[in-house]
Amino acid sequence: MKVLGFLIIPFLLLARINPFEPVITPENMKIKHPKYFHEIKIYLPNNARILKKIIFVYQTLDSDIKQKVVKIDKSIDFHSPIIVMHKPKHFSVHVLYFPTFKLFIKNKKLFFNTKDKLLRIFFLADPFRLVLDFKRKVDFLTIEKKLKNSYVKKIVVGAHTGFYRVVVYFDAKYSYKVKKDINGVLIELK
C-alpha cells in the first residue's frame, strides 16, 4: 500500500489547480498584416524546350492545401527566366452615408461610425456576408448600395423593431476581427 502511495504522489504534484485553464496562452493578439509575394524568376535547365504546365500549390483560409494546374504547352527559350509576379490589388476608399451611421472602407478595414450599441455580429456563408445588428428605434425603408472596385460588393441596411440590421456582402470568404470603441465598430479582414 505504501508503494502505491509513493507512485501516486508524483502525479498529484504535477496536477494543475484548474484543469480547464489553457496550457498555451496567445502571445500576440494583434492582426498580422500579410507580406505579399511580389516576384520570382525561375531559370529552367538548358534542355527545356516546351513548357507543358505550371502547378501552383496554395493554402486556403481554412488551412487546406490545394493546387491549381495551369496548362501552357508552348515553346520556351531556356536562356530567359520565367517570371511569376503578384501585384496586390489596391481598392478605392469609400465613404457611405446611411440614416444612422457613416461607413468608411479602406485597406480591408470597415469602420461603422455610430454611437449605437452593437447587439450582435455573425456571418452567413453563401455568399459570404457579415450581419451586424445595432440597437436603435428607427423607421426607414431598406437601403441597398452597391460598390465598384472594392472587396465589398454591396451593403443592405434595414430597420426592425428596436434595432437596425446592416448586411455587408463580400467578394470572397474572409476571417475578421471586431473592435468596438466609443466612436463605432471597426472590422479588420484578412
Image: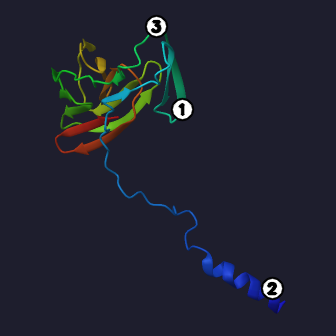
Q: Residue 146 in the image: x percent, y percent?
A: 26, 12
Left or right relative to 65: residue 149:
left
Q: Residue at x 27, y 30 (%)?
A: 108
User: How far apart are the two marked residues, 1 and 2, measured between alpha carbons?
Assistant: 49 Å
Residue 122, by quadrant, is top left
Front one among 161 and 164: 164
The residue pinned by badge 3 equals 74
Q: Mark 2 or mark 3: name the one nearer the start of the chain.
A: 2
Is residue 22 something one can see in this rendering? yes
- 53 vs 108, nearest the viewer: 53
Residue 83 drawn above or below residue 132: above
Q: Which residue is mark 1?
A: 65
Give the residue at the far front of this rendering.
46
The residue type indicated by label 3 comes to Lys
- Name the amino acid type tagged 2: Leu
Seen in the picture, residue 190 relative to 29 is either above or below; the reply is above
Q: Name the residue that disc number 2 marks.
A: 4
**Quadrant housing the N terminus:** bottom right
Task: Give left or right: position of 93 versus 171.
Answer: left
